[in-house]
Image (tube, helix red, strand yellow):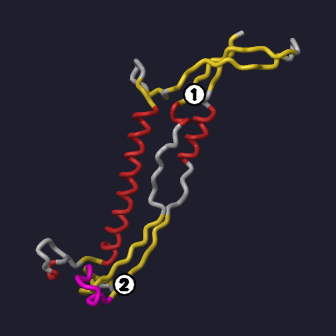
Amino acid sequence: MSESGDAGALASLRVEQLLAAAYQGVVRAQAGAFQEAARVIDGLGFSTDEHGRKVARTLEFDVRRLEFDPELQETAVKNVHVSVPVLSMLTLPNLVVDEADIEMALQITGHDGDAVLRARVAPHQQDANLRIRTRLKQQPSTGAARIGQILDTAVADAREG
């Protein structure tokens, strides 16, 4: 209904336009969630170097570790410098619209040529003469998993004599 509550003011559109508007709303919500996740990832996981390039932030520390020396056939304490990408330690935000059920109660208002229906959202359930139920489902994406694999292999350590 319009803001004034006048049901007669509802626009009559092609049925596919009404469905497309609902689908576009779901896609926009998904895009908004992705943009927010990208903002968080960029802020936490990357810094900019002196050349203006993005560089993964790392957590660096030294540890002492017992290691077996096969040449000496004994265990020795080694100093190890570890560099771990910060993003590999975080649960990255990956909010998705997994499914969206869309139900519409429409009132047919006419047709355009080749039986293309025009309708509007029914102002009251009893006014609906066309009911549409659709389900959108998310397809798995491999992009986030691939980034995780790259980060997992980026962990480095350097041993001191």
Residue at 36% across, 57% down: 29
State the quadrant of the C terminus. Answer: top right
**Nearer to us in this view, 70 or 16:** 70
**Nearer to us in this view, 39 or 10:** 39
Rounded to the nearest angstrom, the CA distance separating label 1 from label 2 is 54 Å
> In the image, is residue 92 above or below residue 161?
below
Q: Which mark is residue 84?
A: 1
> In the image, is residue 130 above or below residue 83?
below
Three-letter amino acid code at the position of disc 1: Val
Q: In the shown orientation, is residue 93 left or right of residue 5? A: right
Q: Residues within 10 Å of mark 2 (few under 14, many from 20)?
A: few
Q: Is residue 100 magenta?
A: no
Q: Quadrant of residue 46?
A: top left
Q: Quadrant of residue 157?
A: top right
Residue at 46% across, 33% down: 45
Give, as a single range, the part of the protein colored magenta. 121-129
At numbered mark 1, what does the secondary structure look like: helix, strand or loop?
strand
At numbered mark 2, what does the secondary structure look like: helix, strand or loop?
strand
Residue 73 location, x and y as percent?
88, 15
Q: Which mark is residue 131?
A: 2
Residue at 41% across, 19% down: 51
Q: In the shown orientation, is residue 22 left or right of residue 59? A: left
- Residue contact between numbered discs 1 and 2, judged by CB atoms under 8 Å: no
Residue at 77% across, 20% down: 67
